[in-house]
Image: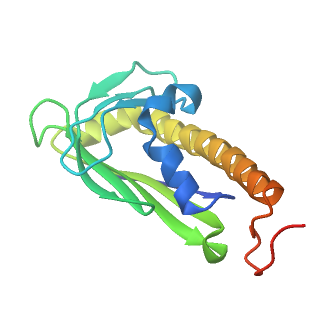
């Protein structure tokens, strides 16, 4: 089973990436998950998922892709491999010449218990993904606006037209 969500964010991929990979700040904005660890390939993370209306669940996935500004992916297992496995991914696609970002937030579930667990948790997990996406959108857009205002105040060319702001 695949769970696939997207959201367009009015912030460049670099800003979205900074928010996404600052795990230590998740508790400030992320209603769906908390993460401890480092976003580097091979790192083991401690991830607590909080699906709306369900009990939290903790996993210890391993980061398999950490392509700065583009993709973060990890793979985790409930118990032993093959019982209930999840490949969680965030893909950042630049839009509008890199001034905006399309976030693809998805997970592929497999294993002998995948159908049963997803019937029980699927809707809540999707709601959690969407809540996280919206919170990430808000945080990244606020940061991007603040960075743009700072660049404008400093007379930096934030428009890309070759002229410093007046």
Relative image position of residue 137 (x, y in whole percent): 63, 48
Q: Is residue 1 visible?
A: no
Q: In this view of the protein, which residue sits in the foreground, 25 or 105?
A: 25
Give the residue at the far bottom of this rendering.
Answer: 162
Q: Which residue is depicted at the point 9% across and 34% down?
A: 80
Residue at the extreme right: 166
Q: Is residue 162 above or below residue 103?
A: below
With 12 as the anchor, is 42 left or right in this view?
left
Viewport quadrant of the C terminus? bottom right
Q: Position of residue 4 (x, y in %)?
A: 45, 55
Res. 96 visible in picture:
yes
Q: How is the image coloured?
A: rainbow
Decide if residue 39 is on the left or right side of residue 101: left
Q: Position of residue 121 (x, y in %)?
A: 39, 32
Q: Nearer the viewer, residue 34 or 108?
A: 34
User: How many tags in the picture?
Assistant: 0
Seen from the viewer's position, the closer of residues 148 and 136 is 148
Residue at screen point 44% across, 21% down: 54
Q: Residue furthest front?
A: 154
In the displayed structure, 9 sits above or below 134; it is below
In the rendered view, does 134 fall on the left or right side of 163? left
Nearer to the camera, 5 or 68: 68
Q: Quadrant of residue 122?
A: top left
> Is 25 displayed left or right of 46 in the figure?
right
Q: Residue at x 49, y 42 (%)?
A: 126
At x 58%, y 31%, the residue is: 29
Where does the image place residue 24, in percent across and percent down from the top left?
Answer: 44, 30
């Amino acid at each position: 089973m695949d769970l696939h969500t997207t959201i367009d964010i009015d912030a460049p991929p670099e800003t979205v990436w900074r928010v996404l990979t600052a795990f230590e700040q998740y508790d400030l904005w992320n209603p769906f998950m908390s993460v401890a660890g480092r976003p580097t390939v091979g790192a083991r993370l401690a991830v607590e998922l909080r699906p709306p209306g369900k009990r939290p669940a903790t996993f210890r996935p391993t980061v398999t892709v950490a392509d700065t500004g583009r993709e973060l992916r990890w793979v985790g297992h409930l118990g032993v491999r093959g019982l209930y496995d999840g490949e969680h991914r965030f893909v950042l696609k630049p839009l509008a010449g890199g001034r905006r970002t399309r976030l693809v937030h998805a997970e592929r579930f497999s294993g002998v218990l995948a159908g049963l667990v997803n019937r029980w948790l699927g809707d809540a997990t999707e709601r959690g993904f969407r809540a996280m996406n919206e919170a990430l959108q808000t945080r990244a857009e606020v940061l991007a606006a603040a960075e743009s205002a700072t660049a404008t105040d400093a007379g930096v060319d934030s428009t890309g037209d070759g002229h410093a702001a007046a």
